Image (cartoon, helix red, strand yellow):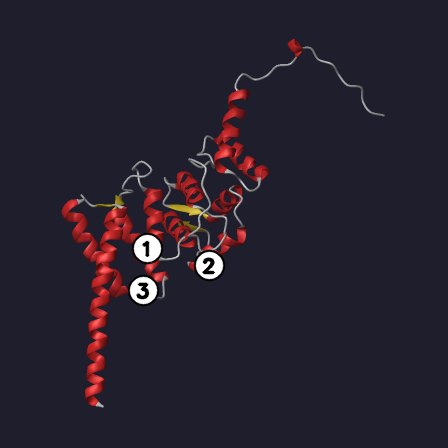
Amino acid sequence: MPLPETMFCAQQIHIPPELPDILKQFTKAAIRTQPGDVLQWSAGYFSALSRGDPLPVKDRVEMPMATQKTDTGLTQGLLKVLHKQYSDKQYVELEDLEQKWKNLCLPIENFRALLQLDPCENKIEWIKFLALGCSMLAGSLNTAMKHLCEILTADPEGGPARIPFETFAYVYRYLSKLDTDSSAAETESYLANLKGNVESSKNGMIGLSDFFVLKGKFQKTYEKKTEKTEASNTERNTFEC
């Protein structure tokens, strides 16, 4: 037999004064972040809120990325959320990182696939995991570094996206080692050219324009040298024949 409905008057119902603002901020955060699983994301949101940790909330609504290699669910905005949660740590526990990954409603198989690129046991250097995430978004090393600069920079959105050259070089070397198409000699030659340009006029900071412009110049120079070498080898072989 159902229990009879209990009637309350307005004076008997106490609404915590902070509740409306909490719900308002939660709603705005959900709209900006657009989580795939609202309940899973909400659990992470209120858990972080109760502990005073950075919230799993995007800065703004993101449009779908047409340049992403595969539909992994991962976006630059979600990587930036993770960075806000871990930027003060050099190393992060994989168990905690996995939980925050789940709270963003990202497929756990993609998390494990990232770790397979550079296997580790219980923890990983945060900057390396961030770099691996950028590589998942990108179709090339060049694009991965672009994502990294835009996530790490203190410049406003749409600005030069500058980061310290030392950080750039560290991540570039790390990702280059995982890229079978890149040789150590090419990596160091590229970084040496880039370092000279940055140190002379940028106070040790590198922005997107520095990277893409110099990358293009260096790539053209490298291709010309390669073409000359191949042409020389062809002439030598023809003469010997």
User: Image height check: is 21 above or below 213?
Assistant: above
- Identify the residue shown where x is 25% and y is 56%: 215
Q: What residue type is labelled 1?
A: Asn
Alpha carbon distance from label 1 to label 2: 22 Å
Q: Residue 62 carries which label?
A: none
Q: Residues within 10 Å of mark 2 (few under 14, many from 20)?
A: few
Q: Which residue lies under the disc numbered 3? A: 182
Q: Position of residue 136 (x, y in %)?
A: 43, 54
Q: Residues at badges 1 and 3 in contact (C-beta under 8 Å)?
A: no
Q: Earlier in the sequence, mark 1 or mark 2?
A: 2
Q: Which residue lies under the disc numbered 1? A: 142
Q: What residue type is labelled 3?
A: Ser
SS class, disc 3: loop
Q: Where is residue 95 in the image (x, y as percent from the top left)?
A: 50, 47
SS class, disc 2: helix
Is 72 on the left-hand or right-hand side of 149?
Answer: right
Q: Earlier in the sequence, mark 2 or mark 3?
A: 2
Q: Position of residue 81 (x, y in %)?
A: 43, 40
Q: How crowded is mark 1: few (under 14 residues within 10 Å), some or many (20 or more)?
A: some
Q: Which residue lies under the disc numbered 2? A: 116
Pick the residue in front: 81 or 221: 221
Q: Which amino acid does label 2 sit on?
A: Gln
Pick the residue in front: 40 or 161: 161
Pick the residue in front: 9 or 115: 9
